[in-house]
Image (tube, rainbow, N blue to C red):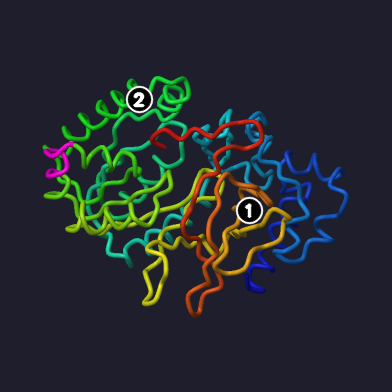
């Protein structure tokens, strides 16, 4: 990362550990850190000194996460999907909106329509992705259509061996999507790879998407290179197909514009202003370009400070594009388990 990001880290650490502006969450933990964050943290590399507190986000009172310096702002609470257990909670006021404006520019560079109506076949409710997609649609003056979608129920069905009921639930989702697509003008479809696979298995619905939709966005779960090729070349050749990596904690990392000579069909790029993603080996060292490592997240915003978070995914480290400082992430894969917990994805 650049010295500009190092300066950002210093400003945000000073903010979050100032008694007048910091959150109760971090101010309470300062004495037990074993170092002085304001004095000892000067670069992005120093973020590795912090403990991974993400497990505490499952139970912490969300009001403790709001910085005292921002108490006059309205905040919303969002939850993770619960793939690794009890959902984690974050708070957001304006920071994510700024990240989404940046991500929207990246998507339009890929050819996603700047204007038009969106259909979201994914979680809403406490999950941040529904709010994200709604804001993407609104930025282009479009209408946001969605379908009731409870990924936690699907994960429970899959985890308890009731796969047939999970399949039936997906068909229920597709029935509702077809109703929207038959009667509404939809430019962008946003969903997950398993749902896209289910769409393609229903010829009438597949034809409906191909005849109406100009862009297909996928995310929420990983897709290998052959799946991406099939989506781009075989199933939706008429549309722009693009991936978005991210979650409630890290925000969004849209696919970057492909470059000649890229060895990966899809390379994701995190937001350079607030997000540092490192790929680490089993000894905790950053891997070299072209190698696979586990995702280590550092989110550094005025609203949320989440350093040194070990994520559930691995990825291949890709060199930044010329003129940029942010590493790319390719071939995302979800770990089969974390500790004693099996990771169950279902359809999200």
Image location (x, y in percent) of residue 246: 48, 49
Image label count:
2
Image location (x, y in percent) of residue 7: 69, 68
User: Where does the N terminus fall, quadrant-wise?
Assistant: bottom right
* In the displayed structure image, the side of residue 179 where residue 194 appears, left or right: right
The quadrant where residue 57 appears: top right
Q: Is residue 209 above or below residue 14?
A: above
Q: Which mark is residue 296?
A: 1
Q: Secondary structure at mark 1?
A: strand
Dot 2 alpha-carbon crowd within 10 angstroms: few under 14, some 14 to 19, many 20 or more: many
Instruction: Identify which residue, 289 or 303, lies in the foreground.
Output: 289
* Region in magenta: 202-208
Dot 1 alpha-carbon crowd within 10 angstroms: few under 14, some 14 to 19, many 20 or more: many
Q: Is residue 133 above or below residue 324?
A: above
Task: Identify which residue is drawn at 17% across, 35% down.
Answer: 178
Task: Identify which residue is drawn at 28% across, 42% down.
Answer: 197
Which residue is situated farthest in the bottom direction here?
Answer: 322
The prevailing secondary structure element of the residues shown in magenta is: helix
Q: Which mark is residue 166?
A: 2
Q: Secondary structure at mark 2?
A: helix
Q: Which mark is residue 14?
A: none
The CA span between labels 1 and 2 is 32 Å
Comes first in the chain, label 1 or label 2: 2
Image location (x, y in percent) of residue 204: 11, 38
Is 206 covered by the magenta stretch?
Answer: yes
Instruction: Identify which residue, 97 or 325, lies in the foreground.
Output: 325
User: Where does the C terminus fall, quadrant-wise?
Assistant: top left
């Amino acid at each position: 990362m650049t010295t500009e990001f190092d300066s950002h880290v210093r400003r945000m650490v000073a903010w979050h550990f100032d008694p007048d502006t910091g959150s109760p969450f971090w101010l309470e933990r300062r004495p037990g850190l074993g170092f002085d964050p304001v004095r000892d943290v000067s670069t992005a590399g120093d973020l590795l000194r912090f403990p991974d507190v993400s497990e505490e986000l499952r139970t912490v009172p969300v009001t403790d996460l709001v910085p005292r310096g921002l108490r006059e702002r309205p905040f919303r609470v969002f939850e993770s999907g619960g793939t690794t257990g009890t959902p984690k909670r974050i708070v957001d006021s304006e920071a994510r909106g700024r990240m989404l404006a940046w991500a929207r520019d990246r998507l339009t560079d890929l050819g996603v329509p700047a204007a038009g109506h969106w259909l979201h076949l994914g979680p809403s409710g406490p999950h941040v992705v529904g709010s994200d997609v709604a804001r993407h649609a609104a930025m282009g003056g479009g209408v946001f259509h969605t379908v009731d979608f409870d990924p936690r129920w699907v994960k429970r069905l899959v985890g308890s061996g009731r796969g047939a009921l999970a399949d039936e639930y997906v068909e229920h989702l597709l029935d509702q999507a077809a109703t929207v697509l038959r009667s509404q003008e939809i430019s962008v479809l946003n969903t997950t790879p398993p749902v896209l696979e289910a769409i393609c298995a229903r010829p009438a619905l597949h034809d409906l998407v191909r005849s109406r939709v100009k862009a297909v966005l996928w995310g929420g779960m990983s897709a290998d290179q052959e799946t991406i090729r099939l989506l781009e070349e075989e199933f939706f050749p008429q549309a722009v197909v693009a991936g978005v990596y991210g979650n409630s904690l890290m925000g969004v990392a849209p696919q970057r514009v492909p470059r000649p000579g890229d060895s990966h069909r899809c390379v994701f790029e995190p937001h350079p202003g607030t997000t540092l993603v490192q790929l680490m080996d089993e000894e905790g060292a950053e891997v070299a370009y072209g190698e696979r490592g586990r995702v280590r997240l550092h989110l550094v915003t005025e609203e949320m400070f989440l350093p040194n978070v070990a994520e559930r995914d691995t990825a291949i480290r890709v060199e930044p594009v010329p003129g940029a400082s942010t590493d790319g992430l390719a071939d995302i894969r979800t770990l089969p388990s974390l500790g004693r917990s099996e990771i169950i994805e279902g359809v999200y």
